[in-house]
Image (tube, rainbow, N blue to C red):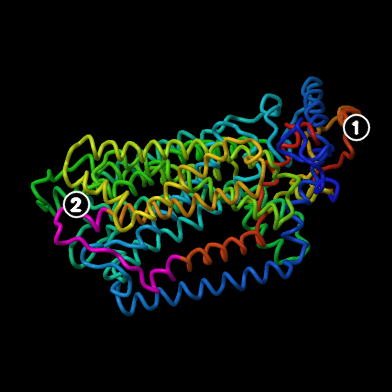
Amino acid sequence: MSVIASAPANPAHPWIAAEHANYSEVTALIADPVLLRPAGWRWWVALGVSGLFVLATVVAIYVLFTEGIGVWGVNSTVVWGYAIASYVWWIAIGSGGTLISAMLLITRQRWRASVNRFAETMTVFAVSISGLFPILHLGRPQYFYWLAPYPNTMLLWPQWRSALVWDFWAIVSYLLFSVLFLYIGLLPDLATMRDRATTVPRQVIYGALALGWRGSAHHWRCYETFQITLAALAVPLVVSVHSIVGLDFAASLMPGWQETIFPPYFVVGALFSGFASVAILTALVRWGLRLEAVITVHHFNAMAKILLLASIVMTCSYATEWFMAWYAGAAADRSLLLFLFTGSYAPLYWMQLFFNCLLPQALWFPSVRRNVLFVVVIAMGINIGMWLERILIIWNTLSHGYAVSMWRLFYPTLWDWMLLFGPIGLFVFFFLCFVRLVPAVPMNELRKLCREEHVA
Amino acid sequence: MTKPLVAEFSDPDSLIGAAQRLKREGHQLLDAFTPFRLPELDDILPVKPPRIRLSMLLGGLAMAGFAYFLQWYSSVIDYPLNVGGRPLNSWPAFLLVPFEVGMLAAALSGLAAFLWTCRLPRLYHPVFDTTDFARATQDRFFLLAAQTAEEERRASLRELLKQAGALAVREQGS
């Protein structure tokens, strides 16, 4: 095992960094950190720190629920704030996880094997967190279930033309779909865990979750058909979910929020920040679980190319937005455009353009793409830039609407900041638990990869 | 009744080779248990192509149809509400929810069909009792072949499996 963990990347089979790796070595490399190796002090420290963030989130939600959304910086002009920006940001990260996993599966990209499991897990956690924000933003969150059509004594139905109702169905469907997609991918690995587990409780739990999987040829065939069909459904599902998020804005009448480009623009943004997040998690998992043997610089190279492409498409979307504002000729739109570049939030807007459009251009250089640190730094920049994009879509339009007398700015409060950073810790907390409970990389796909790359 | 034979192989190619030879010699192959998917086995083993996609399509369409019906019924029949003169049956806006829930229903019907075709969950199976079978989900490849009542045929089956590179040949459950 030490042999395959320290070997350099091999040009003949770029996705596995070892001359030789047999099936049992690969299996042990992934399963042992979960079953045998103790967590280590770094893991406990990380869990403790993220636990503090979880606590902060709980406190912020408690204060919000007891005091109302007046504790945030939202006002009667800027009626949306951090919560909506974070909602879009998180669901975009989730969408990226599904896209990376599903698109690479249907295009039969072998390098998917090492990254798809935690990309899918990232989706489940990010979408769960994202789903919290619209509920938090309701004036009366205790009635969120009114969004569902159920027989009630008020004889009322949901308003099906409302973007909030679309969001509800999109998030619920997408979350459950993602959980299923993750679980199906996990099924053969749970059987491996059942067969390798050394204690009875683990054997029972992994065994029950594995449903009695025994790797029969018939099972594998059904499994493949089902998984690939799910992936084929996942891509349009993600596109539709994120288009619905775009429609939350595009279906309104405010200047800058009436653009038909919003649905595709939001989908590209989702791909962009989602891949950036996967790149960061890949680096963390690779370092934390010592998976240099199966996650190589070529993986970072491949992800960086997609980031570069997404950055260019993103830049074109911004340019289209500017062009249409000018070309359409409406005074309010042109005034908003000027406000973007020179108004009160302009420094943030320039930062957004730097992180999303300019910084990723460094990925044209192969040496940057193959440097894990550079890719991670750029990916972090992209995530900051994409959050800025979402908050600025909200702030600029709402602060600079049609009625000049209504122009006002947004000033975030402590509770805004806590609900911005708290959920990041919540995500890390979930993710830390995940890497200790299930194999972070699909073992069955790695074994298949070993055979296809002729290293086994 | 005679129990089927379980042959253990160390690599996928020996298993595929053995399966091909057994099939040529007229032995009855039942199944193979492998740690990852081997597409080559589809042509050798009597595996029926799964009908999972059809049930996904039907489940998805049925749910989408139901969701549209629910929207139509609630906003045209049960609770007509004129919002700014918009048509009661606002079909473009009403397509979003059916699409989302239809996708989810397709996935769930696919899960049901997958479990049904695979006869899972089934936590116990006699093959689990075979020595070393825990490695079928890790690094070993197992072939399951039926034994006949004739003593000669049985001996030749065992001989064939050994020749094809089996590390061990056992009766199922032993």
Horizontal and vertical percent position of residue A159: 21, 55
**Left or right: A395 in relation to A422:** left
Tell me the residue at 89%/38% (across/down).
B167
Residue with the mark numbered 2: B74
**Left or right: A268 in relation to A13:** left
Q: Is A403 a magenta residue?
A: yes
Does the rendering let one see residue B151?
A: yes
From the image, which quarter does the C terminus of chain A lie in? top right
**Left or right: A319 in relation to B9:** left
Q: How many marks?
A: 2
| Chain of the residue displaying label 2 | B
Q: Residues within 10 Å of mark 1 (few under 14, many from 20)?
A: some
User: Is A418 rendered above or below residue B63?
Assistant: below
The part of the chain drawn in magenta is A397-420
Horizontal and vertical percent position of residue B82: 9, 51
Horizontal and vertical percent position of residue A385: 45, 51
Give the residue type that dot 2 points to. Answer: Ser
Q: Nearer the viewer, residue A456 or B144?
A: A456
User: Is A431 rendered above or below residue A329?
Assistant: below
User: Is B104 rendered above or below residue A194?
Assistant: above
First of labels 1, 2 by sequence position: 2
Rendered image: mark on residue A26: none
Do the numbered discs 1 and 2 sit on residues whose CB atoms are within 8 Å? Answer: no
Residue with the mark numbered 1: B162
Horizontal and vertical percent position of residue A394: 30, 55
